[in-house]
Image (cartoon, grey):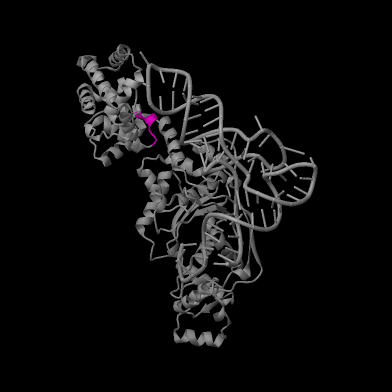
Amino acid sequence: MPPRVRFAPSPTGYLHVGGARTALLNWLYARKTGGIFILRIEDTDQERSTEAHTQVILDGLKWLGITFDEGPFFQAQNGGRHKADAEALLAQDKAYRCFCTREELEVARQAAVKAGSSFRYDGRCGRLAAEEVATRVGRGDPSSIRVRMVDGEIAWDDAVHGRISFQGHDLDDFIILRSDGTPIYNLAVVSDDIEMAVTHVIRGDDHISNTPKQIALYRAMEKPTPIFAHVPMILGTDGKKLSKRHGATAVGDYQHQGILPLAMRNFLALLGWSPGGDREILPEAEMIDLFSLGGIQKKAAVFDVAKLEWMNGQYLSARPAAELLEPVQVHLREMGVDPMGRDLVPLIDAVKTRSRTLLDIATQVAVRLDRSRVVRDAKGIQLAMKLGAAFSTNLLSSHAALSALAPAQWTPADLELTVKALAEREGKKLGDLMQPVRVALTGGTVSEPVNELLAVIGRDESLARIRAAAS
RNA sequence: GGCCCCAUCGUCUAUCGGUUAGGACGCGACCCUUUCAAGGUCGAGAGACGGGUUCGACUCCCGUUGGGGCUACCA
């Protein structure tokens, strides 16, 4: 029997990098073991779930190349079975009707909080006489259904944490079916995982405290429990749970910033999982081959954007410029830049090893195409300040030397000779002479060799930019 | 507060009782380049603390401290 795993997101928000990582780990496990990867959309919270969010999740997974074998299934469509499962438990007296209202419960909860302890349902409705329950039901009193928690140890051997143990008496009789007949999360999950024959539940650490409740349900329903693997959470740089406060947390954010899907996936795989050696760049086949649940870290991991960008730069450098053309064009379009029919491939080639994202590349290309895109960055400003008056005089002498070149001589080779001759004549290091030109032409201090840059930008435009920067 | 989880460089991690505690990102220096990156070399940088167990602990056990999660008729 091949393993069956699932990713079960709620469509109540965008696809969070943590969710994407959980999906990735499930996918890796399925691919490694020849198992089945199921996608289940947990939309039982009708208040917050939206179709748009479901679509974003689907798009995000597709973008990352995380393919599923079954689904997407929609949990809300299984309401009938969820209800039947709750009623079956009721019939066996493993669950009972609770007539307490939300208001009564809220009052009790507030009182508990005030007393400095936590609220735990006291099970009063579980002690109601059968006749009373019958008359109240007959009278039409609304009621939810609660499971009877049994005392004793509830423990499991977690595939990443080892043995985790809870005590039944620390848990209360929790609601499994709302008074409107819809299921509560823990019931829906267990009912669906049983129905879908899920063998391995690989999910976030934050579900550890749900697990004993779910195991109690498996026991009540007399079904075997799956293997649980609780993977660590992803934190922001301040060590707190990653949230909007930390900036980009949605997979789509990184897509828009020009991160390549394979780089994103590679980075995510290595966040909280290690193949055991020094490997960083992992092609798909190796990632799958090396994967094991045992390599998953117990400790929460901090999401380090700098490393993501470094990794993206690695993927960018390794990719032929022609393959980058399309995504770069998308970014240019979003920036409102019209290439006017120019062949962008050589431009991309010139800047890709100097870029960390597709957006970096597009920005650099735009600067070469359009003077109005030249914005002096921090390093450029710093250089101009450092040089003071020399910044302008350097530019002026470069301008003089370059404008002496005929249009036909405006080639990388001739430009290189001219520039070197100038440095010779002035007794300056080439770098000292060229950095101001770089800043004049691009606004920044990083570019391809200046002679090539001049050729790419063209004679008149280059001279104009140098003149403008010198004044 | 209660229950549970966690603890190696700033960050991601290797180590599964015996290592000068290794690698990667970031940072610094140097090399390459009469230029910027990339690349290469080198450097700074870690076992939270206290007890055990053991011939020997980063590694096993206990405690402390510090983080985190959960504590809904949300998922």
Q: Is residue A352 magenta?
A: yes
Q: Residue furthest front?
A: A389
For image coordinates 42% across by 48% down, the residue present is: A61
- Front-most of A147 and A314? A314
- Front-most of A98 and A360? A360
- Front-most of A192 and A404? A404
Q: Which residues are magenta?
A: A351-356
Look at the image and tell me whether residue A199 can be seen.
no
- Name the main secondary structure of what is drawn in magenta: helix
Picture quadrant of residue A339: top left
Left or right: A392 with respect to A215? left
For image coordinates 55% across by 88% down, the residue present is: A131
Picture quadrant of residue A51: bottom left
For image coordinates 53% across by 61% down, the residue present is: A195
Left or right: A415 with respect to A320? left
Residue A12 position, x and y percent, is 40, 59
Please say if B6 is above or below A89.
Answer: above
Look at the image and tell me whether residue A435 can be seen.
yes
For the C terminus of chain A, give its image quadrant: top left
Residue A418 position, x and y percent, is 28, 14
Please say if A327 is above or below A229.
Answer: above
Q: Is residue A101 magenta?
A: no
Residue A424 position, x and y percent, is 32, 12
Total number of numbered labels? 0
Left or right: A77 with respect to A208? left
Residue A159 position, x and y percent, is 61, 52
